[in-house]
Image: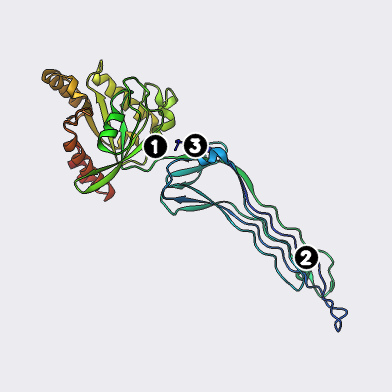
Amino acid sequence: MKFLDQAKIYVKSGNGGPGCVSFRREANVPMGGPNGGNGGRGGDVIVEAVDGLNTLIDFRYQQHFKAKSGTNGMGSDRTGAAGADLIIKVPAGTQILADDQETVIADLADVGATTVLAKGGIGGKGNAYFKSSTNRAPRFAQPGMPGEEFWFWLRLKLIADAGLVGLPNAGKSTFLARVTRAKPKIAGYPFTTLHPQLGVVYTAANEFVLADIPGLIEGAHDGAGLGDRFLGHIERCGVMLHLIDGNGEDPVAAYHTVRHELEAYGYGLETKQEIVALNKSDLLDDETIAWHRAALSEAAGADVTVISGGTGAGIDALLKQMLEMITAWRAGDEEAMEVAAP
């Protein structure tokens, strides 16, 4: 299924049904009073976060959503039926924004979360409602109130325990394919990954969800490359795994580039617990590994893990460390996360 993390939709709630003008007319009651019922209420448009979805692709083919209108009131003081609510199902982690794409209307981070986007119109009053001591036979009724209509933007931010960040061609997709059952496209050129990928890591009889986003480049927070569009997918992660290409031209400069983009983007990314891993160690000799590791440790202010996504070297220990930090994050134990950090 193709991944889509942003969509624009139009919603309209149901109109209220009009009230009824009616009078009681029976053989033995020739001058009965008004008995017109009220119109039914229009249906609401509701958005619900559900399990089992991880893309907004369905909204590419359907952008307009309209709830049912209420039915007319009827004689004998019968109220019209209310219009059925329309429930729009979205993946957990979906934000609903106003048409300006900045104002957040709702953040459906958890499965089962709901919000009403448009309330149905109120049904009109029938003529029985307007009967009074001075107007015994009103011959008018209210029309139903119109429903609300809006344009909204849906923006999906993936729900994952850990996020993979790094420059293009740092080996993120190779790492994801090795530790999960995900099958991302892997190639020896930058920007092979064009869409976020999710995978479930199984380790030590536990599991956690890992998200891989397209590689970042300088200026990503301002929209350069693909980073600005997808940095939001790691906002909800508890831990970031920062992969550095050990075979790259300058691993330390690569580290600083990504850190700068995370800090410039904001939204708490710069404060998340980070594991720095020197990748592609199978392409380096021991002396080069030691030199890069020392330089990166100084730049990051923490120990650096050495791994190879291609051969699997060092990955078991790294996953154990990630699991410890994620477990602490899930429990809200910040001190334990710091102890588990490299």
Q: Which badge, 3 or 2, is on the more N-terminal residue?
A: 3
On-image quarter of the N terminus: top left
Q: Amino acid at mark 1?
A: His
Residue at the spot x=13%, y=18% of the render?
285
Numbered tag placed on residue 6 in the rendering: 3
Q: Identify which residue, 63 or 24, lies in the foreground.
A: 63
Q: Amino acid at mark 2?
A: Cys
From the viewer's perspective, is 117 left or right of 278?
Answer: right
Q: Quadrant of residue 253?
A: top left
Residue assigned mark 1: 233
Give the image's coloring scheme: rainbow
Numbered tag placed on residue 17 in the rendering: none
Say what secondary structure mark 3 lies in.
Answer: strand
Mark 1 surroundings: few (<14), some (14-19) or many (≥20) residues within 10 A: many
Q: Is 220 drawn above or below residue 315 in the view shown?
A: above
Say what secondary structure mark 2 lies in.
Answer: loop
Numbered tag placed on residue 20 in the rendering: 2
Q: Position of residue 215 (x, y in %)?
A: 35, 26
